[in-house]
Structures are given as structure tokens and as C-alpha cells.
Image: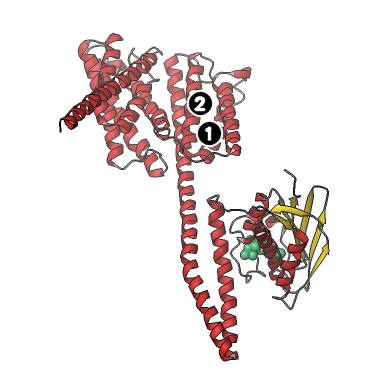
Amino acid sequence: MKLKFTSHLANRKYGYFSYLAEIIALFAIYFSTAKLGLSLDAVSRFATLIWLPSGIAAAALLLFGYRLWPGIAIGAFLVNLLNGAPLFVAVGIGIGNTLEALVCTYLLKRNGFSYSLDHLRDVLLLLLLAMPLSAIIGATIGVSSLFLGKVIASSSYYLTWEAWWTGDMISILILTPFLLTWSKWPRDKVSVKRIAEIGILTLLVLAVGLIVFLGLFHADERSYPITYLVFPPLIWASLRFGQRGATSAMFALTILAIVGTIQALASFLPGRLSMSLLLLQSFMGIIAVTSMILAAFMAERRELEQRKDEFISMVSHELKTPLTTIQGYTELLHGRFAQQGNQEALLYISKMAAQIGKLSKLIADLLDISKIQAGKLAFAKETVDIDLLVREVVEDLQHTTSQHQISIEGIAQREIAGDRERLGQVLINLITNAMKFSPRAERIAVHLSHTHDTLTVSVQDFGIGIPKAHQQMVFERFYRVYSDQDKTYPGLGIGLYIAHQIIERHRGKMWVESVEGQGSTFSFSLPLAGEP
Ligand code: ADP
């Protein structure tokens, strides 16, 4: 009992300490970033356009709770007092800035704001409600305190308010989403390709930032509106890397823009720094809004896509179980009727079995699609004799058609390392497609050939062919070629996608050559066994 009590006390002590430490940390960050802002040509000495504290304060309360408010209050009070504000004015500003963060947090939390900003609703909530309203509170209380304390005259009230409001809004707009989206470290595995893409994008953002805002190359901005250069990397970041990409690119560009404007190198109007900063911040605000909305749209789309994948996976699993049972009973019935010699029943059973076979193939394809999406398509590594495999598949499929004559031409004469069943699946898919899409032709040819390091298999038909514009797309998921004549061909448009994935996973290539009305040749090449 005693032990429990002590540990409880220790916990509470630790709780107080960590609470105090959090407040001190927030105070320190708030104070130092505020000091930096106030040093940058603040309007009426107190309203600065570079006001990082607002964004930091809102993010801190959202992430760690309202209880951290004293860090903001003390930071805002002290920094203004030291900046020359009379005591009561500094108290007023402190109250205004604290209320700003509290109201921003309240409005967002109350409306179920998600920190990932993955829905348009979250972005609009921040942009249209929390950001402007809380900044109005901060600016109005702050500037009114200055006015009542006779620090500013009534004539400069509006100018000061405008700078204060804009500075706070931009900070909440750019910094808060940046901090929120990075508050959770992404846990997905990142592929080498993606890392390379991130690297290139980062370089592009930096290059554009340096050119546009820091006047690198001293481009003559009067004849070239180079500020538009910021759009391509921002759109790239938003489309490919979602809200994290958008907010990070925006953050980096904003830093460069501010540095550039302060150094008076930027392409905005010369004159007072505060005026340039106002123009710059408006520009940054507009592009931040654009890229965040774009990123939210993309995230919503991705979520929908993910839900569709999950649905396909669930449906195919759900369908598989009863179908397996039906298959079992059909075999049982087949055995019974065979014993009885009931030929009519056997005929019906074999028709049922054929349809069950088709259904199982469809479900197996759908399951493969889900596995590919989840990166879980497993491959065996065995030595595969391609000539033998082609012969077996052709023999099997020849039994299913009386119309088509399938011939094998050439010889691969090589073995490769791969998954025999999966490669067989590719062949079956190509040959059944050749049969399906050549309803009036009789011949299908499978060509085998090799070079010193690869072997190639081609399936040639003399059917309807594929129009040029569709040829690359047939390897995409759910893609089917529609035209007036061939809309009756059954299928889901997934066979070639799966085949393409299987060949890619074998480090091979797959392609099609086709002439509409004359036929198609689908080929794949594979590296030979022993090759890396
Ligand atoms: P599906 O199940 O619809 O056949 P696939 O992924 O196998 O799906 O093929 C995608 C589309 O490519 C088909 O719908 C068809 O339009 C076209 N296609 C595939 N193979 C051929 C072929 N041999 N000749 C003509 N069109 C083909």
C-alpha cells in the first residue's frame, strides 16, 4: 500500500515536472520566434508579418492540450514588454495571443478536425473558420491594447491591424498544418524510387525558391513573371506526397521567400520591407491554400481507391468460401452419378463444373489484384523449362477449343528461374485472350526465341486487334477496349494487368504489337537463369 502511494506521488511529481517542462519549452520557442518576428520591420513596432508564434501556439495546443496555454501567455507578455510595450499593453497582447491559440484549437477540435488534413472538410475548417476568426481575435485585442495604451494613434490602427491579422493568419496557415502533418512520423515503407523522387523534388523546391525569392541568376523579373515557377513543384508535392508534401514544400518556400524579401532581393515591389512582406505573404497565402486543397482532393481520392481495393479483397474472400463448398459437393455428386451411370445428370454436372471453374478463375484473379495492391503476391523460385511449360499449356487449352489451332513455333531451349505456376498463368491468359478476341480466325501461334541473355515468348493471333491509342493502356488495372463491334466480349480487364505484374516481378518485360482488324501479338521476355 505504502509502495503504491509513493509511486503515485512520484508519478504526480513527475507529472508536474513534465508539465512545467512543456510550458517552459513552449515559452522558449514562442519567445525566440516572436523576437525574430518583431525584429523584421514590425508595423508600429509591434505588428509583424513574420509571426511564427501563432502557428506554433495553435499546433502546440492541438497536439498537447489546452493546458499549455501559460507558455503562450508568458511568452507573448514578456516579448512585448521587452519590446517596449507598457505593462498593461503587454498584458493585453498576452491575453489576445493566448485567446487566439485557444479559440483556434477550440474551433478545430469541436468540429472534429483531423490533423492529417486529409479531407477537404478539414482544410476548409482551418481556412474559412479557425484561421481567420482566431487571427481576428489576436489582432483586435493586440492592436486595441496598443491603441488604448497610446502606443499607436487611431490613424495607424487599421494598418497595424492589417499587418497583425495577416501575419497571424499566414503563420496558422503555413506552420500549423506543417507541424500537425509531421506530428506523426509516416510508417509506410518507402521504396528507393520514392526516395529518389523526394530527392529530386527537394532539389527542385530549393532551386525554384532560390531563383524566385533569392534572385539566383539575377533573372529579369519584369519581363519574366518568374514567381509562377513555384507552382510546378508545389503541385508535384501535393499530388504525389499529399498534405505532408504540400505543407513541407510550402514551408521551405516560405522560409526562402522571407529570407529573400528581407534581403530585398525578391521580385516583389521595392519600398518598405513591411509592404513587401504584406505582398509576399498574400502571395504565399494563396499558393498555400491552393496546394492544400489540391492535396486534400488527392488524399480523398486515394482513400476512395483504398476502400475500393479493400472491398474487392473482401468480396473475393467472401465469394471464395461458398464456391469451394459448391465445388466440393459438385465433385461428390459427380462421383455418385458416375457410379449410377446416370449420363444425363453427369452432363449437367460437367456444365456446372465448367461454370464453377470460370467463377473460380475470376475470384482467383480478383484475389491476385488485392495481393498485388498490398504487395503480397508471393513467388516461388524454381527452375522452369519454358518449352515444356508452353507445350503443356497449349495442349490443355487446345482441348477447350475446336475452332482455333494453336501452334508452337521456335524453341526457347533455356531454363529460367521463376514461378512455374505464375508463368503458366501468364501464358494461359495470353492464349485465352487470343482465342477470345479472334472469333473469326482459326490460327494462333506461340513463338519462342532466345538471345544469349533473354528468352522471348510471343502469342500471335489474327483477330480484332487493338487500336494504337489503347495499346499501352491494356496493361492497366480494369482497362478494357470498347468499340461498337466488340462490346460483347466478357471480362473484367484484369488479366493483362496481373500478367504484366508477374512478368515485371520476374525482371522481365511485356509488350504488345497490334494492327486493328488484323490481329495482335503479345510478347514477354525474361532474363535467363543465372543472370542477376
Ligand atoms: P479481359 O478480362 O477484359 O480480357 P485483359 O486484361 O486480359 O482483360 O485484357 C484487357 C483488354 O485488352 C481486353 O478487354 C481487350 O479489350 C484487350 N485485349 C487483350 N488481349 C487482346 C487480344 N489478343 N486482341 C485484342 N484485344 C485484346
The yes-or-no answer for disc 2 within 8 Å of ligand 1 is no
Q: Residue 3: image x %, image y %?
A: 18, 30
Q: Is residue 403 visible?
A: yes
* Side (left or right) of 185 relative to 526: left
Q: Residue 116: image x %, image y %?
A: 40, 39
| Residue drawn at x 71%, y 50% as measured from the top left | 508
| Residue drawn at x 31%, y 37% as measured from the top left | 108
Q: Quadrant of the C terminus?
A: top right
Pointer 2: residues within 10 angstroms few (<14), some, or many (20+)?
many
The image quadrant of residue 348 is bottom right
Q: Secondary structure at mark 1?
A: helix
* Side (left or right) of 87 relative to 120: left
Q: Amino acid at mark 1?
A: Leu
Q: Residue 390: image x %, image y %?
A: 75, 64
The image's colouring method is secondary structure
Question: How far is the residue under mark 2 from the one under mark 1?
Answer: 9 Å
Q: Nearer the viewer, residue 250 or 363?
A: 363
- Which of the two discs, 2 and 1, labels the residue nearer the N terminus? 1
The yes-or-no answer for disc 1 within 8 Å of ligand 1 is no
Residue marked by disc 1: 234
Q: Quadrant of the N terminus?
A: top left
The image quadrant of residue 272 is top left
Instruction: Please report contact status of discs 2 and 1: CB closer than 8 Å, yes or no.
Output: yes
Q: Nearer the viewer, residue 202 or 459?
A: 459
> Compared with residue 117, is residue 173 higher up or lower down, i.e. above or below?
above
> Compared with residue 450, is residue 293 higher up or lower down, i.e. above or below?
above
Q: Amino acid at mark 2?
A: Leu
> Compared with residue 485, is residue 424 higher up or lower down, i.e. above or below?
above
- Which mark, by number, is residue 253? 2
Q: Residue 438: image x %, image y %?
A: 73, 70
Q: Quadrant of ligand 1?
A: bottom right
> Compared with residue 387, is residue 31 higher up or lower down, i.e. above or below?
above
